[in-house]
Image: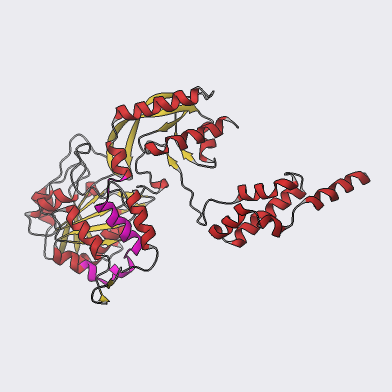
């Protein structure tokens, strides 16, 4: 080896700053308070090693360490949802409103979740959130909340039908996602399933013939992620309620009241008014709230569910209760705003962004697009939208960027649909596109 090479290597190593010197950088001191000293020190040592290997200059160690640090102590990264799917399951479904996020922050410390501050005695858990849920649903005598929609149905089946019969149409024996099938879920509770009708046609008479002394309830499930068209028939809740057995309706998407853009999507208020004894739903879909399972209905049934031993295992934490109440009582949710966004406004936003980026040399154009609800809601319904069309290579680069953006590929182009992107994030989206263009 040339002696001069060894001398140069030694000189570089001598110029690499000590760990304590790098850690005194104000940016890293702030990061230590946010992420913990151990995590920051690990990033500093990685940066020093890169300097030893010649990958970065010794005077760039602090900058490199800063670049290696995550934005937060948690492993989840915030992304911009430009897929055109409003409730994207892989992206966590409904984004919380600003009011819900503030409520979660306020509830992070000690709260009165189970304490009556006036009397100093124990109080019902989440009482104000439950009152808000009853008020929003309108026709519910009582409400209960568990950790997700499937849990709501499991609790109902366990508390009301263990060792008894649940009558359900063959056309509603659905798979709810990721291999979880409704029949398997219900049988696991100890209930017996009594299937009636056919895949495409089931009548009230089919249910009536199946009702007997061992019947716990009739179950009606909204086939939320598929549609059957053509020669079909299904009784409504009113017809089933007349059979003298409780009717449980799993509406799935969490719509509490009718929505003009989704006329075929069942809602809790309508089903309860029609005679449903119990309605189950998800909170993180069209309601626009946190992940949770909603149970609404007759007071005696909901009371039995809330007192069942399984309810303790399925209960939600104070952060979920806080977010749910703020969703119900606060301003509109991002999901509601995305659903109601005017197509003309989306087009104007896409054209403005495209013109801005095109002037900077980006291969981009504004194009019409079609968005969907997603999350098992409103199958077959498309929503007119607008998108930025970019070269295909942008898709992966945007996903893996500093500020990840998830779009979709269509006809060899990367589309960034704006319907689920809040207008306040337009500049953030443009910056992400620019960063790819500069690579």
Does the image show residue 385? no
Q: Is residue 108 magenta?
A: no
Q: Residue at x 91, y 44 (%)?
A: 4
Residue at left offset 26%, top offset 75%: 122
| Total marks in image | 0
Span colored in magenta: 305-333
> In the displayed structure, does residue 404 sit left or right of residue 208?
right
Question: x and y percent of residue 254 in the render?
Answer: 25, 50
Query: Where does the N terminus fall, quadrant-wise?
Result: top right
Out of 105 and 267, give the one closest to the viewer.
105
Residue in the picture at 14% in, 64% down: 299
Q: Nearer the viewer, residue 59 or 228?
A: 59
Which quarter of the picture shows residue 234? top left
Q: Position of residue 199 (x, y in %)?
A: 22, 44
Quadrant where the image shows the C terminus: top right
Point out residue 316 in the picture as x, y percentages from the top left corner. 33, 63
| Dominant SS type (magenta) | helix
Foreground pick, 364 / 16: 16
> Please, is residue 217 above or below residue 234 in the view?
below
């Amino acid at each position: 080896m040339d002696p001069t090479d060894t001398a140069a290597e030694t000189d570089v190593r001598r110029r690499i700053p000590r760990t304590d010197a790098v850690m005194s950088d104000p940016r890293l001191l702030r990061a230590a308070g946010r992420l913990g000293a151990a995590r920051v020190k690990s990033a500093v040592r990685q940066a020093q090693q890169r300097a030893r290997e010649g990958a970065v200059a010794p005077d760039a160690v602090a900058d490199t360490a800063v670049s290696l640090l995550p934005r937060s102590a948690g492993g989840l990264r915030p992304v911009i949802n430009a897929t055109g799917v409003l409730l994207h399951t892989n992206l966590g479904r409904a984004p919380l409103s600003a009011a819900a996020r503030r409520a979660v922050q306020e509830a992070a410390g000690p709260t009165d979740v189970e304490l009556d501050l006036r009397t100093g005695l124990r109080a019902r858990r989440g009482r104000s959130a439950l009152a808000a849920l009853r008020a929003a649903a309108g026709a519910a005598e009582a409400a209960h909340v568990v950790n997700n929609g499937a849990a709501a149905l499991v609790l109902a089946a366990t508390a009301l039908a263990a060792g008894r019969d649940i009558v359900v149409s063959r056309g509603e024996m659905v798979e709810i996602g990721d291999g979880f099938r409704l029949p398997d879920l219900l049988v696991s509770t100890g209930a017996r399933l009594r299937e009636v009708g056919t895949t495409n046609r089931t009548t009230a008479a089919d249910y009536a013939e199946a009702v007997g002394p061992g019947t716990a309830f009739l179950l009606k499930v909204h086939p939320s992620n598929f549609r059957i068209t053509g020669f079909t028939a299904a009784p409504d809740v009113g017809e089933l309620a007349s059979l003298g057995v409780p009717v449980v309706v799993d509406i799935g998407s969490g719509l509490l009241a009718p929505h003009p853009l989704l006329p075929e999507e069942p809602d809790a208020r309508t089903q309860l008014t029609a005679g449903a004894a119990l309605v189950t739903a998800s909170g993180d879909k069209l309601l626009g709230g946190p992940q949770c399972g909603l149970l609404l209905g007759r007071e005696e049934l909901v009371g039995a569910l809330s007192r069942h031993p399984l309810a303790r295992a399925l209960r939600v934490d104070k952060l979920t209760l806080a977010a749910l109440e703020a969703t119900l009582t606060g301003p509109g949710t991002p999901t509601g705003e995305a659903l109601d966004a005017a197509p003309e406004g989306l087009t104007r936003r896409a054209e403005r962004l495209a013109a801005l980026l095109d002037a900077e040399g980006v291969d981009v154009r504004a194009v019409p697009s079609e968005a969907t609800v997603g999350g098992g809601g409103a199958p077959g319904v498309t929503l007119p939208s607008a998108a930025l069309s970019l070269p295909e290579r942008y898709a992966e680069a945007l996903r893996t960027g500093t500020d990840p953006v998830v779009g979709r590929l269509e006809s060899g182009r990367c589309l960034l649909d704006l319907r689920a992107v809040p207008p306040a994030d337009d500049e953030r989206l443009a910056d992400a596109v620019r960063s790819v263009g500069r690579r």
